[in-house]
Image (cartoon, rainbow, N blue to C red):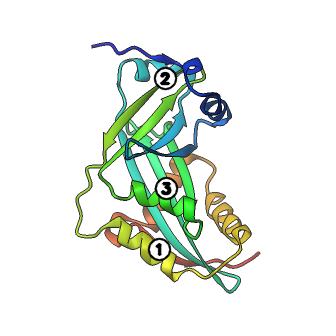
Amino acid sequence: MIFMTNANSTLPQNIQDLITALSTQQAIPLGKINEIPFLALRLKASKEDLIRDNGIICELKPSIFNVDYQGETIALCFMQLRLNRSKEMIYTVQYDLKNEKQFSDVWALLEMQRYGLLIATEQVHDFQQFDANFEADFHPRDILAGARSSATDYDPARYEEVAFALRSQTKKEDEFWELLDEMTPFDQHWYARLKLERE
């Protein structure tokens, strides 16, 4: 069965502008649509057939951190999405867990039931929904809430420094995926506490 693609020109202008600004390695939260949390991401033009043919599967993986840095404890989460198990289609979103809006966005995702993606190229898009298919003896929302409660009242600039320091450990998204797998493995409930020294 072949699915029709939708022209980006049919989207509101602010969403068109968002798609244009997106890199092919980042995803952006869109909030809830019909009570389902959505993220936007952009594919390379050469992958347009995946949208047309409804040929996308998606893995959703959080990594939750408390980082002790300069007398403060920062709480953050990286959310990674991998399409079709391809190291060329990994997207990362980062969240400051002390920021109410960002915490709300990741809280909705970590219900780990259903989520949606606005998947676009420069020209076309589709809205698709996915099941999280989560089975474990812990709930990621508990880990998220614990990390937030352990944080101090740091300045947002501290969060940016810490997030940048962690992201800069690797240059490619697939390397970052593997690094976060090592730092926050599933059997440790996708959580780690670190101490970061200023260089």
Label 1 sits on what residue type? Ala
Q: Residue at x 39, y 65 (%)?
A: 185
- Residue that protrudes farthest toward the right in the picture: 199
**Depth order, front residue of 77/110:** 110
- Residue that protrudes farthest toward the front in the picture: 34
Spot occupied by residue 35 in the image (x, y as percentages of width and height): 37, 47
Q: Contact, CB < 8 Å: mark 1 with mark 3?
A: no
Q: Taking 73 as reference, is 27 above or below it?
A: above
Crowd tier of the residue under label 2, counting other residues whose Cα lies within 10 Å: few below 14, some 14–19, many 20 or above: few
Q: Contact, CB < 8 Å: mark 3 with mark 2?
A: no
Spot occupied by residue 52 in the image (x, y as percentages of width and height): 41, 18
Label 3 sits on what residue type? Asp
Q: Please give the residue where the numbered disc 3 appears in the rendered image.
A: 105
Secondary structure at badge 2 equals: helix
**Depth order, front residue of 88/164:** 164
Q: Earlier in the sequence, mark 1 or mark 3?
A: 3
Q: Say which quarter of the image contains residue 136.
A: bottom left
Q: Residue at x 59, y 66 (%)?
A: 99
Label 2 sits on what residue type? Lys
Q: Earlier in the sequence, mark 3 or mark 2?
A: 2
Q: Please give the residue where the numbered disc 2 appears in the rendered image.
A: 47
- Left or right for 25, reference 142: right
What label sits on residue 192 in the rendered view?
1
Secondary structure at badge 1 equals: strand
